[in-house]
Image (spheres, rainbow, N blue to C red):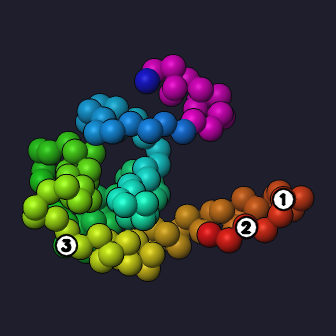
Amino acid sequence: MKYILKLCGEGKNVVCTIHQPSSLVYDMFTNVIVLSGGETVYCGSRTYMIPHFSGIGFQCPKYMNPAEYFVNLVNTDFEDRVDITKLVHAYSQSTVKKLLLDQLSADRTTLQHLPDIEL
């Protein structure tokens, strides 16, 4: 992970798929994407993730690894599972998503030569 952080420090984009990272690794992330059944449950800053889920009634326990908590929350293999469609809807209406779309829009203005894409 230190090498990946070095690459980020050099301005390079790094995309990693890590299932249930340790708290130390999770704390190194800038942004996080949480998917369930192919649906986006969260996509945005790691620092906004806990407040986002708390705001919709899912408080990560104080001493629990957030990555573990959120993976367990959206895992459809468990009997006491959450209604994923509600989580997807909450994210789609969230300030976090709006911030992401605003940033993408701002980034696109510097890249006018790219074709439009629909998000």
* Residue 99 position in % (x across, y down): 53, 68
Q: From the image, state whether disc 2 or disc 3 is nearer to you.
A: 2
**Which residue is tagged 1?**
114
Q: Where, quadrant-wise, is the N terminus in this rendering?
A: top left
Magenta extent: 2-14
Task: Please report the residue visible at 24 percent of the width from the left and 55 percent of the height from the top.
Answer: 75
**Which residue is tagged 2?**
117
67 drawn magenta: no
Q: Nearer the viewer, residue 86 or 105?
A: 86
Q: Do the numbered discs 2 and 1 sit on residues whose CB atoms are within 8 Å?
A: yes
**Which residue is tagged 3?**
57
Residue type pointed to by label 1? Leu
Seen in the picture, residue 49 relative to 2 is either above or below; the reply is: below
Q: Which of marks 2 and 3 is nearer the N terminus?
A: 3
11 drawn magenta: yes
Seen in the picture, residue 4 relative to 113 is either above or below; the reply is: above
Q: How far is disc 2 from disc 1 in space, using C-alphas?
A: 9 Å
Give the quarter of the image for residue 86: bottom left
| Secondary element at tag 1 | loop
Q: Where, quadrant-wise, is the C terminus in this rendering?
A: bottom right
